Amino acid sequence: MSLMHKIRWYHAALAILTLLAYFSGDFGAIHDWLGYAVGGIIVLRLGWAVLNPRQLGLNKFYPHFEGLDWSNALSHPAISKSLILAVAVTVILATVTGLLTLGAGGHVFEDIHEALSGLVIWAVVLHAAYLYLMKRPLARFMLYRDDPTKNRRKTAAR
């Protein structure tokens, strides 16, 4: 399995678990276990970055704004990376505050956790909308609607 396909599987697992955790907020233990699963996926991604820093390092999340101007403002990679960073930071903070609600005095973190969870959904919506509008081939690939390797094979066979 190629690296891009592994990333796609990771992405799908994180997206599904995050959405299920968000929408199961009123279901107590189910919500808690889905939150643990999201935390596990995050730990897996951090471990993956440490073990393979060249292709999957955390620097992939850091936007570089060099070369950004009005002519390329919507297609510059910094925009996409900024949205990915927003998703990553809000998911991590929502997961951490969710864990903190389970400890002694956890009620202090409940409102923060809820607010961050709402921000996660907004960041995900902005991320998905941007990819759909500006980077449609990548969005199609991540949603299992298009496999670029098949197109390359067909082109190479001709």
Image (spheres, grey):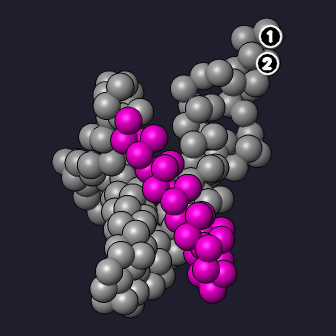
Give the residue at x 53% y 65%. 35
- Horizontal arrangement in the rendering, residue 117 relative to residue 68 (left or right): right
Residue pointed to by mark 2: 154
The residue type indicated by label 2 comes to Lys
- Neighbour tally class for label 2: few under 14, some 14-19, many 20 plus, Cα within 10 Å: few
Range of magenta residues: 20-47
Q: Position of residue 97 (x, y in %)?
A: 36, 73
Q: Position of residue 34 (x, y in %)?
A: 60, 64
For the question of whether residue 76 can be seen, the reply is no
On-image quarter of the N terminus: top right
- Horizontal arrangement in the rendering, residue 126 relative to residue 60 (left or right): right
Q: Position of residue 126 (x, y in %)?
A: 50, 70
Q: Position of residue 135 (x, y in %)?
A: 55, 51
Residue pointed to by mark 1: 158
- Neighbour tally class for label 1: few under 14, some 14-19, many 20 plus, Cα within 10 Å: few
On-image quarter of the C terminus: top right
Q: Main secondary structure of the magenta part?
A: helix
For the question of whether residue 82 can be seen, the reply is yes
Local SS, label 1: loop
Figure quadrant of residue 2: top right
33 or 82: nearer the viewer: 33
The label nearer to you, 2 versus 1, is: 2
150 or 58: nearer the viewer: 58
Local SS, label 2: helix
Mark 2 touches mark 1? (CB < 8 Å):
yes
Find the residue positioned furthest to the left: 66
37 or 62: nearer the viewer: 37
Give the residue at x 35% y 75%. 103
The residue type indicated by label 1 comes to Arg
